[in-house]
Image (cartoon, rainbow, N blue to C red):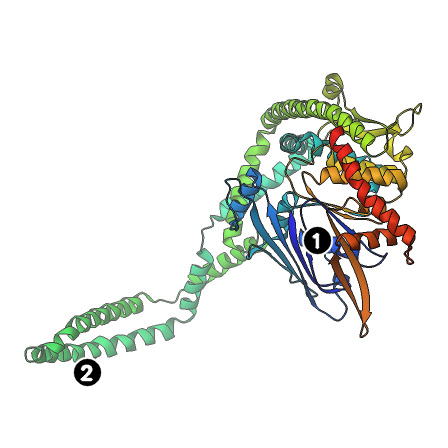
Amino acid sequence: MLQLLNINNIALIDSLRVDFEKGLNLLTGETGSGKSIIVDALGILIGGRFANDLLKSGTDRAFVEGLFLVSPHPQLQSLLQTAGIEQDGGSWNGDPLELIVRRELSTTGRNKIFINNQLATQSFLRELRPFLVDIHGQGDQQSLFNPATHLELLDESAETIDLRGQVAESFQRWESLRQELASVVSDEAKRFQLLDTLKYQIDELERAQLSVGEDEQLEEERRRLLNVEKLTSLSHSSYARIYEDDDAVLARLRQTINEIVELSEYDSTFRDYLEPLESARASLEDLAFTLRDFADRLEFSPARLAEIDDRLTELARLKRKYGGSLNSALEHLAASQDRLRSLEHVDERAADLEKSVNTARDEYVQCAGRLHKERVRGAKKLEQAIERAMKEVAMENGRFEVRITSPSAEELKENQSQTNYRIDCSGIDVVEFYFSANVGEELKPLARVASGGEASRLMLILKTAANASEFPRTIVFDEIDTGIGGRVSEAVGVKLKTLSRTNQVLCVTHQPQIARFADTHLVVSKETAKGRTRVSVGKLDRAGQVEEIARMLTGAEITESARRHAKELLRSKVVSALGEGKRE
C-alpha cells in the first residue's frame, strides 16, 4: 500500500506531503482544489507521461516520491532481484517490504528514477507498477465503449497473459517463415536477373584475387620506387656512420663497452650497464646490415611502377563499387557466393520452407486454440462475477455477457491469407461485451446501451471484481462517481468499502454518500497568499468529517440540518458495511 506521497513543484503544488492509511482513503474538496493533481502526480511517479506544462510556474525542477509497503510476491521478488534492487524493511518470509520510489523531473528532459536509492529505468518502473498502484482516472470508463479494450480486460481477468505470450511468439515464427517463403518464390524473373548479377560480380571479384592490405602494401612499394635515389643515399650514409667510418658508432660503442668492463672490476655498480650496452650494440649491428641489404635491393623499375599503378587503379575501382575497402569487397564476395548457392537451390528451399510454414501454422493454431478455451472458461467466470457485482452497485436487473467470435477449425484451415478473420499475435478471438440494464431488454453491445453512470460502475466492477485479490495493492479511482447519485452512490460506496478490505483504495469523490464510508478522509483545499496559489491536504477527524460531508450536501453555506444529515450518514455507514459483509 501507499504510505506516503511527497510532491514538489507539480502544477499548483509547491510542496505537499500526504500520508495514507489502510482501507478506504477518500479525497474530497471543492472543484478545482487540486484533488486530481495528486492523482496525476501519483501516475507520474509510477511511470506515467510527464509534460513540462505540469511543472509549477517559475520552476524548472520537480520531484514526486512515494513510500510503498508491499506484500511479498514471487514475480515481484524476481523483478527486483533481476534489477539488483535492494529490499529494505523486510524479507521474503512473509514480512511486508518497503519500496521508496522517487522520480526527479526537469524542463531539460533529464529525468531520473530511483527505487530504494538505486537508479532505475522508466521501462522497469512500468514493469513494477502492477504490484504497486492501479489507477483509474476520469474518463477511463470511456474505454469500455471501445471493443478493442474488451479482449485486454478479459485476458486480465482470465489470467491468460503467459499463454497469450506463447501465442504471440508462435505467431511471429509463423509470420516470419511466411514472409521468407513469399520472398523466395515472389518473382521468378527477378530471381534469374539476380542470379546473373551475382555470377558476374563473383567472377569479377574472384579474377581480381584480392587480399586484405594489398592496397597498402602496393602504395608503400610505389613510394619506394619513386624515391629510389633518396632512399639509397639515406641508407648508405646511415650504414657508414654506424659501421664503416673510422669513427663509426659501433667502433666507439665497442671501445666504451671494454672500458666499462674494466671499470666494473673495480666498482660493481658498472656491471648493471653491461647487458644494456651489449643489447644496444647488437641492435645497431642488426640495423647496419639491414640498411646495407635494403640499399642493395633498391632498383628503379619503370615497368614495375606502371604495373603497380594499374593494379592500384583496379583496386580503387573495386573498392568504390563494393563498399569502399578491400575488406568490404571480400565480404561482398562471400555474401554473394552464399546468396548464389541459396538461389541455385531455391526450389528445394521453397519446399522446405513450405513445410516449416505449415508446421508453424499448426503450432500457432493449437496454441491459439488453447488460449481460446481459456478465454471461454474465463468469460463464464467473468460474466458470473460481473452479474453478482452489479447487484452490489444498484444494477439488480443488469445482465452482462462476453461474446467471443472465432473461426472454426475448418475455416482456419482454409484461411491461408488471413483476411477473413482476426488471426494475429493476440490469437484468433474477437471479444465484445454485451449489456442490458433493464428487464425485458435484449443484450446489445455495451457501447450502444450503457449510460455514463452505468459505465462508471461497470469500470469499477470490471477492474476489481474479478482480480482485486490477485495481490494486494493500491487501487485509485479519480471521480468514479461521475454520472451517478443518491442510492447508486451509496451502493458504489459500499463496493469501494468492500474492495478496501483486501486492497488499499484511494478515491476522489464529490458524493457525500460515498465519502461517509471513508476509513481515512482527506480534504484538499486551495488558498492564495502573496500572489501564489497553494494546495494543502488535511486529515479529518469525526467533527471535520461532519462539516465536510455537510458542505458536500449543501454547498458553501452549511446548515444545522445538513450537519444532522451528515451525522446520520456517518452513523448509518456501519450498518451498510455490515450488510455488505453478510452478503459476501
* Mark 1 crowd level (few <14, some 14–19, many ≥20, 10 Å Cα): many
Front residue of this view, candidates 207 and 547: 547
Looking at marks 1 and 2 on the same chain, the residue that comes earlier in the sequence is marked by 1
Residue 168 in view: no
Q: Residue 247 shows which numbered tag?
A: 2
Q: Residue furthest right?
A: 440
Residue 90 at x, y percent in the picture: 52, 47
- Say if 183 sits above or below 119 in the image: above
Measure the C-alpha gap from mark 1 to mark 2: 88 Å
Circles 1 and 2, Cβ within 8 Å, touching? The answer is no
Q: Is 271 situated left or right of 503 in this image?
A: left
The quadrant of the image that shows the C terminus is: top right
Residue 180 at x, y percent in the picture: 64, 33
**Residue flagged by tag 2: what amino acid is it?**
Asp
Residue drawn 57% across the image and 39% down it: 73
Residue drawn 85% across the image and 57% down it: 30
Residue 431 at x, y percent in the picture: 78, 29
Say which quarter of the image contains residue 41.
bottom right
Find numbered disc 1 in the image and state the secondary structure of the residue it sits on: helix
- Say if 185 sits above or below 56 in the image: above
Say which quarter of the image contains residue 345.
top right
Find numbered disc 2 in the image and state the secondary structure of the residue it sits on: loop
Front residue of this view, candidates 5 and 123: 5
Q: Can you identify the residue that label 1 sits on?
A: 42
Q: Residue 411 shows which numbered tag?
A: none
Residue drawn 86% across the image and 45% down it: 482
